[in-house]
Image (tube, helix red, strand yellow):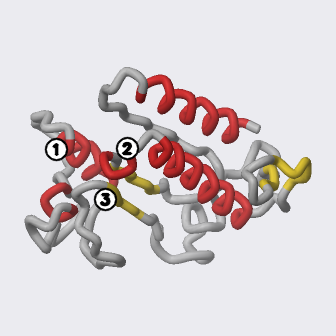
Amino acid sequence: YGPEMELNYSLDFIDRNSKLKKPLFIYLPVHLGNKNSSQNFPAPPIYGKSGKRTGELQPATMQSHVEYIDYMLTRIEHKFREINQLENTIFIVTTDNGSAGFGKDDVREQKGSRVPLIVCGGNIKKRGITNELTDLSDIFPTIADICDAQVSDVDGKSLWPFLTGKTDKHRDWIY
């Protein structure tokens, strides 16, 4: 199961790099939530409370994919807790505009893109749900800001001042 292989590689990467005591960056583009070439959702494995496979598959639905992504993020969070780096870790979780019938190809199904953006971790001001405007072009300058890297000629605007509470406003418009 591809997403499980990607998860296991990410967990191993965290282990290997934590021994080097250097900062690390994981970009994990999970491809769940998309239909395969025969327009079916692949069925993810079911996990028991111990985090072990039960040997069964979940029904192949968008809900089962979202539940598996939640499982993956929980495993990654626990790995950072295990190596005592959870407070030094920032999680940025977002999606593209979804699969057909879920806002991507057929707007009759769901108006708008309905893309979540969850950012949490060290130095992030807890705000809960906010109506501030942002788009995916803001992610790169935000990561650059977190890393104290200077970037120019980018379309996005760093969310870091908003995320850390230095400002309560991010954007007035998106084009």
The amino acid type of the residue labelled 3 equals Asp
Front of the two marks 2 and 3 = 2
Q: Position of residue 31 (x, y in %)?
A: 61, 45
Q: Position of residue 127 (x, y in %)?
A: 28, 75
Residue in the picture at 69% in, 40% down: 4
Q: Secondary structure at mark 1?
A: helix
Task: Give the labeled residue for mark 3.
Answer: 135
The amino acid type of the residue labelled 1 equals Asp
Residue in the picture at 25% in, 43% down: 143
Task: Give the labeled residue for mark 2.
Answer: 85
Q: Residues within 10 Å of mark 3 (few under 14, many from 20)?
A: some
The reply to whether dot 2 and dot 1 touch (C-beta < 8 Å) is: no
Seen in the picture, residue 161 relative to 150 is either above or below; the reply is below
Q: Nearer the viewer, residue 115 or 7?
A: 7
Q: Answer with the quarter of the image where residue 134 lies.
A: bottom left
Task: Give the labeled residue for mark 1.
Answer: 145
Residue in the picture at 22% in, 48% down: 142
Q: Answer with the quarter of the image where residue 131 lies.
A: bottom left
Q: Answer with the quarter of the image where residue 21 lies.
A: top left
Q: Position of residue 81 (x, y in %)?
A: 46, 48
Front of the two marks 2 and 1 = 2
Distance (Cα) linking label 2 and label 3? 28 Å
Q: Earlier in the sequence, mark 3 or mark 1?
A: 3
